Image: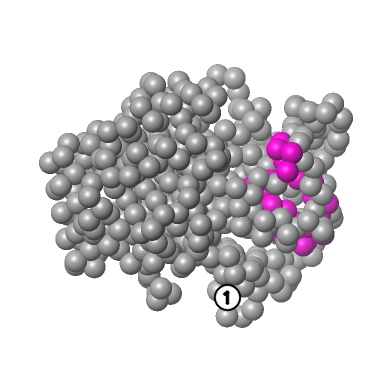
Amino acid sequence: MAALKVLICGGGIAGPALAFWLSKLGHDVTILERFSCLRASGQQIDLRGHGIQTMKRMGLEQAYRSKIVNETGLQFVDSSGRRKAFFPANKTGQGLQGFTTNYEIMRGDLCRLLYNATKDSVKYIFGISVASFQQDDKSVEVTFTDGSRHRFDLLVGADGQGSRIRKMILPPDSPDPFHSLHMYMAYFTLPRQEGDEYIATGYLATNKRLLFTRRHDPKSIQAYMGYSDESDQLRNVMKSDVGEQKKIWAELFQDAGWQAKRFITAMQDDSQSNDFFTHEVGQVRIDNWYRGRVVLLGDAAYCPSPATGMGTSSSLVGAYVLAGEIAKHLNRSNGVDGGNTDGAGDPTLSALEAYQRQLKPFISQVQKLASGFWVPSSPWGIAVFNFLLGLAAYLRIDALSRWVLREDVRGWDLPEYAELAQLRLWGDSVA
């Protein structure tokens, strides 16, 4: 197999996952991360379905399990903190995961895990990104933000929901690939207090507001604030400084009840919380994930949104499929598997087309959101909603996993790639 020189823009999860496979296959891989160091931060994430299967094929299950968050389940409470419904984590290893999975992990821990698995075989460059690029039939010439120029066989945009690489490959008159779900979220951590346990806790407030907590270590918890409606105020403040963003969120939630005052106090005090982040929730949907020798991966191409519970899984699965198709098509071009050896067509370009064709049916299901999902706004609506959640919990019907989360992908199996299997990263017991 001829070695490719590959540049990956983005050092989060999708980029290093692809680098993991490509470097194992002998390719020359460089990762650019525009931040000055590894961004090992963020909130709690998880793996589901095919994402779990992919992680096991990477041979990383033991390392992953050493970092899991042992969350017991999800509860909903009223303004007095009284439990209205509880959905325990599915620890059986059978069937669909609930809201809480057997594979909960902090985003930073997964970033470090992937970095440690690739740092000796992949070149990481921090504090620099892609300024521009030009491509021809054989390569891509990339100009870095430091002014230097470099030539690669393949450029991968794994730079997230707001991808700069995506903006560069789309025509200027293209429709906006970001499709808002009319929801805004704010995230931060705050000191733990008595009563904060290893359980996800949600509280619905009037006017389509949500407060949510999760605990991941002995001293702190994660706080989430959600607003599920159109808001010009929140949309316009996204490009403002963090202080202005916090001010808007504090105004929106000052009368929300439950632990809103605790959230607001901690959010505005940098000594208690210094990792505030806010964004508009939505999906990225584009027809073509590549142009020439430039290809998009993960949230840059098909962000499914946190509402599906499948963002991290989609990134790992996408990286696996892209690496597998590259390996398969390069082998075919070299006649390794007895395939076409007449030199017709570029194997790298064929691999990109096959990556999109193979993965799109999976992504289409992952991005299909529940229709008619009701978010209550009035006290009466919240009471009804909590009653229905309590009834579902009593009947042991995990409403979220059945009707909201998108783990149950049907009619699509994780592809088998002989070239990846030959790396012997996983045993016979891993499907």
Q: Which residue is mark 1?
A: 430
Work out whether 15 lies above or below 74: above
User: Is 18 in the magenta?
Assistant: yes
Is 25 situated above or below 302?
below
Q: Residue 250 is drawn in which quadrant?
A: top left
Report whether residue 348 is seen.
yes
The magenta segment is: 11-37
Quadrant of the image occupied by residue 280: top left
Classify the position of the C terminus by image quarter. Answer: bottom right
Residue placed most toward the observer, 380 or 216? 216
* Residue at the (21%, 40%) spot, across then down: 376
Q: Position of residue 12 (x, y in %)?
A: 64, 47
Residue at the image point whose x is 79% and y is 47% from the top: 124
Question: Could you tell whether 422 is left or right of 259 in the image?
Answer: right
Amino acid type, callout 1: Val
User: Toward the viewer: 154 or 348?
Assistant: 154
